[in-house]
Each structure stands twice: as C-alpha cells, then as structure tokens.
Image: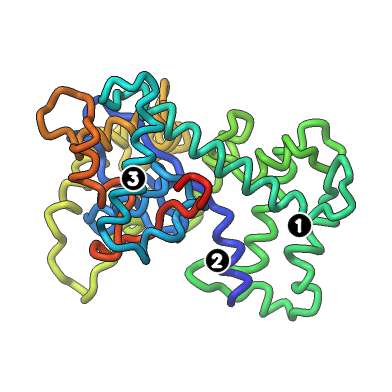
C-alpha cells in the first residue's frame, strides 16, 4: 500500500486559535505534522509539529543527524534573521512573520514541484483527466475489491472520490482544469479561504465513523484515543476531553457535533495560525516571562524549535546556503 501512504501525505496541517498558550485545547483534527501525527497525540505533545511550523516541512531534513552544538549554531543564525530590528529580542510579531514566511515558502516550493511533475509540457492548466492518470492511473488495472479495500479506513476509491470533489471546488471557472493558483488551493486547501467547506466536509467524514453526518462524543474521543486493552480505564486527559466536548464543542447540548459546531471547533472566527503558533513557542521558551525571547532563551530550548538526535524529534533545516 505504498501508493496509499504517498497520497495520504497530501493532507496538510492547521492550528487553532486560543486566548492563552496554557489554555490550548489538546486536540484538533487538522493539526498534525508531515507524517500525519497529531500535534497532541494520545495526550502527549508532538514537538515535531512545532519544528515543522518553525522551519517549514521541507526544511525538516538534516538536524536529526547533527550534534547539539551544530544544531545550536545553525539555530543561532536563524534567530539573527528573525530579529529584524537587531535589538537582541525576538518579539511575537517577528516570530509570527517568520512562521508565515516558512509556511508560504513550503507551500510555494511544494506547488512548484508538483506543478512541474504533473505538467511537464508547461501548459497554463492541468486537466483532471491528466492528474487522475498520473496519480490514480494504476487503479485501472485493479479489481473492484482492490479499489475498495480499506487500510486504516481509507481506500483508493475513497481517495479518488475525495480528490475529485476537492478538484471541483478548487476549479473556480468550472473548466475541469486547474490554473497554478487553483492547483495551490487543491493541494493546500486548509490555507485557502475558498476551500473552507470542503475541508470541513473531509474532516467530518474522517471522524464520523457511522456516516450519519454528525459526530458523537465516542467518535470525537475515538479520533484521538484507542485503548490498548478492552475495558481499560480512560486516562485523565480523555476524561478532560469528554468534558470539553460537552461544555464547549456541543453548544446545543444534543450530544452530537453538527456541521456548524465542527466548523466552530476547527476554524474559529478571527483565527490566525501563525500568531497562535508564535505564542505557543514563546510560552515554551520565555524563561523571564517578558513575552519576548532572547537568543539565549531560544538556544536553551533549541529542541523545542528544531529538535536534535538527542530528543528523537530530529528533522530541521537543510539549506546549505543559509549556513
């Protein structure tokens, strides 16, 4: 199922907005790293997510092989770039702009790479049939059972159906072909305002196991936690999530999340992804609580920002021209 795993990597990440870093809800279905591991997986903080937000997903390649001192040296060079006014402090606004830059750079480079891959002749658009043949053409030789065989609840057929729907939404002029801008929305829907409804639909489909169009508390919990043994006692963080579902997610108190309640959960109003992640990183490293970071504070928490072999998180910046 290598092709299945490869297609799954098209999914992207999203952070939720919150008033204070220490009040961050522990679960959001769109918030995961490039390996599709949740930011908060099984109640534990997945620092790889923060590394990729700070560096960009495609930059998470080489720090895993670096000793701590080299990791710190390279991080120091990055800090000098983030500190735009050279006053010795990294402020919220400076860190926010850096995260926006790294995420935009990742999106642009990913789109450029896939645009060339699926459009070798350099046309103005890519047709659906051309894309389907490139990505799903192997399905033509599969039996119906093979196309519908599920792995982790996902089949080739369901992925094709999902991509076809996403393509149709991205296709703003309805010519069944995507310009580069439309193709960007298709590949990275959570970063596009015009794709909000299809992201919402996909999220509900992923969590709604009985396909009744709404999310029960058990489906909500099941998306983030699977007991090792039948009948085992739930951990405290799951009990807390059940309370969060009842008090804050299920606003009409009917025991389910409908479409608008899910929308309020995954895409809060006035949401600012980059600012939320910047606040989170400052919270993690701000030793003197002055709401800004010195280079020493960042280097002291280098594993929070870029990881290292010693932390098992690894992966970071691989641009030789920046070092």
Q: Is residue 164 above or below residue 177?
A: below
Q: Is residue 103 above or below residue 139?
A: above
Look at mark 2 in the image and give the residue it sits on.
Answer: 154
Task: Please tell me which residue lies in front, 183 or 224.
Answer: 183
Q: CA distance from mark 3 to mark 1?
A: 32 Å
The answer to whether the residues at label 3 and label 2 have Cβ atoms under 8 Å apart is no
Which structural element holds mark 1?
helix
Residue 214 visible in this rendered orientation of the protein: no
Look at mark 1 in the image and give the residue it sits on.
Answer: 117
Q: Is residue 191 above or below residue 271?
A: below
Mark 2 vs mark 1: in front: 1
The answer to whether the residues at label 3 and label 1 have Cβ atoms under 8 Å apart is no
In the picture, the quarter occupied by the N terminus is: bottom right
Residue drawn at the location 52% of the way across and 73% of the way down: 151
Q: Is residue 95 left or right of residue 167?
A: left
Which structural element holds mark 2?
loop
Dot 3 or dot 1, earlier in sequence: 3
- For label 3, the crowd category at 10 Å Cα-Cα, with few meaning under 14, some 14 to 19 and many 20 or more, is many
Look at mark 3 in the image and give the residue it sits on.
Answer: 75
Which structural element holds mark 3?
helix
Residue 211: image location, x then y, percent: 50, 55
């Amino acid at each position: 199922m290598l092709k299945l795993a490869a297609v799954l990597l098209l999914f992207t990440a999203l952070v939720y907005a919150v008033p204070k870093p220490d009040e961050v809800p522990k679960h959001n279905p769109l918030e995961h790293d490039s390996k599709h591991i949740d930011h908060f997986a099984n109640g534990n903080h997945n620092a790889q997510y923060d590394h990729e937000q700070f560096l960009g997903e495609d930059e998470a390649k080489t720090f895993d092989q670096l000793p701590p001192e080299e990791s710190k040296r390279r991080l120091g060079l990055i800090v000098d770039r983030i500190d735009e006014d050279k006053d010795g402090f990294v402020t919220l606004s400076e860190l926010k702009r850096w995260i926006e830059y790294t995420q935009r750079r990742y999106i642009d480079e990913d789109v450029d790479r896939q645009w060339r891959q699926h459009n070798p002749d350099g046309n103005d658009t890519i047709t659906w049939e051309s894309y389907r043949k490139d990505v799903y053409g192997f399905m033509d030789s599969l039996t119906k059972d093979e196309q519908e065989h599920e792995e982790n609840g996902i089949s080739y057929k369901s992925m094709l159906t999902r991509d076809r729907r996403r393509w149709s939404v991205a296709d703003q002029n309805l010519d069944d072909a995507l310009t580069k801008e439309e193709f960007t929305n298709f590949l990275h829907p959570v970063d596009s305002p015009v794709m909000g409804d299809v992201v919402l639909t996909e999220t509900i489909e992923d969590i709604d196991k009985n396909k009744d169009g709404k999310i029960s508390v058990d489906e909500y919990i099941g998306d983030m936690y699977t007991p090792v043994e039948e009948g085992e006692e739930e951990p405290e963080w799951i009990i807390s999530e059940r309370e969060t579902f009842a008090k804050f997610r299920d606003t009409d108190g009917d025991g389910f999340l409908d479409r608008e309640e899910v929308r309020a959960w995954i895409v809060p109003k006035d949401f600012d992804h980059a600012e939320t992640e910047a606040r989170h990183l400052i919270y993690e490293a701000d030793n003197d609580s002055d709401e800004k970071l010195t280079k020493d504070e960042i280097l002291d928490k280098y594993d929070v920002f870029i990881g290292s072999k010693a932390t098992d998180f690894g992966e970071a910046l691989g641009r030789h021209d920046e070092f």
